[in-house]
Amino acid sequence: MKELKLKYSKFIPLKGFYAITLFGYLVRRKEYKNKPVSNLVMNHEMIHAAQAKDFLPGIGYIPFYILYILEWLLKLIPCAIKRKSAYRAISFEQEAYKNELNFNYLNSRKRFSWTKYIFKL
């Protein structure tokens, strides 16, 4: 499994989150620098990298982040009513969480697989 390159930050990701994929890098808070990245976390974040690559090569991360934020905003109200996390309802997260334990998933993943989760809360 090819891994994402690691970067560390004082502020990213926000407290309460362990890691985030930003433009092809796995970014973790500095306090986790001495803890190894689990295969599960790496696989989850690599699924996000593959999702970004579904879009135009080179600029795939920009449409990915725009759609990610738009979907999160659109799901805030219905998820608040159902008392569910809007973050977990984002289609990109649903695909990543559903398949993070399948370490061969990226070998068989079809482009735009995240779209089947768009209308699920």
Image (cartoon, rainbow, N blue to C red):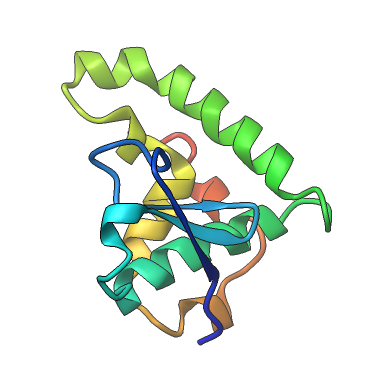
Q: Is residue 119 above or below residue 75?
A: below
Q: Quadrant of the C terminus?
A: top left
Give coordinates of residue 46: x percent, y percent: 51, 67
Q: Is residue 37 above or below residue 49?
A: below
Q: Is residue 36 left or right of residue 47?
A: left
Q: Is residue 29 left or right of residue 74?
A: left
Question: Is any atom of residue 46 visible in this view?
Answer: yes
Instruction: Report how many numbered discs are placed on residues in the image.
Output: 0
Give coordinates of residue 108: x percent, y percent: 56, 80
Q: Is residue 74 left or right of residue 25?
A: left
Which quadrant of the view contains residue 113?
bottom right
Q: Kindly identify the residue that appears in the image at 16 percent across and 22 percent down.
A: 83
Give coordinates of residue 96: x percent, y percent: 41, 58
Give coordinates of residue 114: x percent, y percent: 53, 52
Question: Is any atom of residue 101 visible in this view?
Answer: no
Q: Is residue 105 above or below residue 82?
A: below
Q: Nearer the viewer, residue 115 or 43?
A: 43
Q: Kindly identify the residue that appears in the image at 45 percent across and 85 percent down.
A: 104
Q: Kindly identify the residue that appears in the image at 56 percent across and 47 percent down.
A: 115
Q: Kindly identify the residue that appears in the image at 76 percent across and 51 percent down.
A: 55
Q: Nearer the viewer, residue 48 or 16?
A: 16
